[in-house]
C-alpha cells in the first residue's frame, strides 16, 4: 500500500480489522512483524529510529491523534499541552502565537487554563487535535476521530481536515463511519477481518460497492415488519465507542 504526499486516505474496516494497529505502525509506535514501512525513502524500523536525526524528523513531520485522546494528554493545562510540541524547536515568543492559533482553530481557547484530563471526551479530542496540528506536520494520522463527538464537533473536525489538506498535509484517517468517508477522503483502503487490505480505490468506487461493504461487515440489509408487510433497507453496522 502506498500513500502519496498530500493525499487524503481513509482506512476503513470493521472492528478488529487492524485500523488502529496500522496507524500505530505508520507513526513508528510499534513495528511490523513482517514487511516494512518507509517514510521519506527510509525504513521505519527500530534500527532506523536509533538515528536521532531521522527520529527527530519523523516525530516532527508525522502526528497522530488516538481514538482515546486521553491516552496522549499529560500536561497540567491545555495551554501547556498544546505548547509541548512547538517548545521542542521554537522560541518561546513564537510558541505562544502558535498555541493561540491552534486553540482558536479547534475552539478550545476558553479551556486554556483547564486540566486536560478533566475535560469532556469531545473537548479532549479537540485538544489532542490542536496538539497535533501545532507541530504543522506533513502527515496527520487520525484514529476514529469522530468517536465521542457531538454533531457540531464533527463538523468542526471535517472543516479542520479540509483546511489541513488545503495546506498540503497528508491525512490518513482510520474509521468505521461510512458516512464520514465521503467528507474526509479521496481514496479508501478497506481492511478485511483477516487484517489484510481487501480493496483500495476511490471513495466513489469503494463506497458504491454495496456487496463489498456487506461482505466486510460495514452494513447489512435490515429486514423488519410493519403489520402484515415486511420491509428491507440498508442498515449501517456501527461500533460502540470504547
Image (tube, helix red, strand yellow):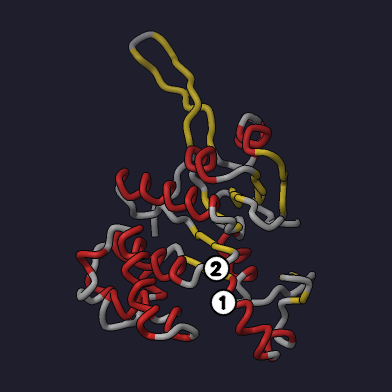
Q: Residues within 10 Å of mark 1 (few under 14, many from 20)?
A: some
Query: What percent of the width, then of the height, locates residue 141?
Result: 55, 62
Which of 224/33 is in front? 33
Q: In the image, is 119 to the left or to the right of 170?
A: left
Q: Which quarter of the figure has residue 139?
A: bottom right
Image height of 58 relative to 141, above or below: below
Look at the image and tell me whether residue 121 can be seen. Answer: no
- Work out which quarter of the rendered image holds the N terminus and state it: bottom right
Which of 112/218 is in front? 112
Query: What percent of the width, then of the height, locates residue 210?
Result: 62, 29
Q: Residues within 10 Å of mark 2 (few under 14, many from 20)?
A: many
Query: What percent of the width, then of the height, locates residue 32?
Result: 71, 73
- Work out which quarter of the rendered image holds the C terminus and state it: bottom left
Q: Are marks 1 and 2 in contact (CB under 8 Å)?
A: yes
Q: Residue at x 48, y 72 (%)?
A: 135
SS label for mark 1: helix
Residue 60 is labelled as 1
SS label for mark 2: loop
Among all residues in the image, which is located at the extreme top? 228
Q: CA distance from mark 1 to mark 2?
A: 6 Å
Residue 137 is labelled as 2
Query: What percent of the width, then of the height, locates residue 60?
Result: 56, 77
Which of 230/216 is in front? 216
Which of 141/96 is in front? 96
Q: Residue at x 65, y 44 (%)?
A: 187
Look at the image and tell me whether residue 16 can be seen. Answer: yes
Amino acid at each position: 500500500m502506498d500513500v502519496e504526499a498530500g493525499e487524503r486516505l481513509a482506512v476503513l474496516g470493521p472492528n478488529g480489522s487492524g485500523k488502529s494497529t496500522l496507524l500505530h505502525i505508520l507513526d513508528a509506535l510499534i513495528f511490523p512483524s513482517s514487511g516494512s514501512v518507509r517514510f521519506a525513502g527510509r525504513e521505519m524500523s527500530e534500527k532506523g529510529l536509533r538515528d536521532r536525526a531521522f527520529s527527530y524528523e519523523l516525530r516532527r513531520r508525522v502526528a497522530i491523534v488516538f481514538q482515546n485522546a486521553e491516552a496522549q494528554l499529560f500536561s497540567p493545562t491545555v495551554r501547556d499541552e498544546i505548547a509541548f510540541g512547538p517548545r521542542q524547536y521554537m522560541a518561546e515568543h513564537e510558541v505562544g502565537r502558535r498555541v493561540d492559533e491552534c486553540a482558536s482553530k479547534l475552539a478550545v481557547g476558553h479551556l486554556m487554563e483547564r486540566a486536560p484530563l478533566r475535560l469532556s471526551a469531545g473537548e479532549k479530542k479537540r485538544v489532542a487535535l490542536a496538539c497535533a496540528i501545532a507541530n504543522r506536520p506533513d502527515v496527520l494520522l487520525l484514529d476514529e476521530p469522530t468517536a465521542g463527538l457531538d454533531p457540531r464537533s464533527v463538523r468542526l473536525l471535517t472543516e479542520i481536515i479540509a483546511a489541513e489538506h488545503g495546506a498540503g498535509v497528508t491525512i490518513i484517517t482510520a474509521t468505521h463511519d461510512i458516512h464520514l468517508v465521503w467528507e474526509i477522503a479521496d481514496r479508501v483502503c478497506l481492511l478485511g477481518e483477516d487484517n489484510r487490505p481487501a480493496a483500495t480505490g476511490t471513495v466513489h468506487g469503494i463506497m458504491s460497492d454495496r456487496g463489498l461493504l456487506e461482505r466486510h461487515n460495514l452494513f447489512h440489509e435490515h429486514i423488519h415488519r410493519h403489520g402484515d408487510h415486511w420491509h428491507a433497507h440498508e442498515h449501517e453496522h456501527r461500533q460502540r465507542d470504547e
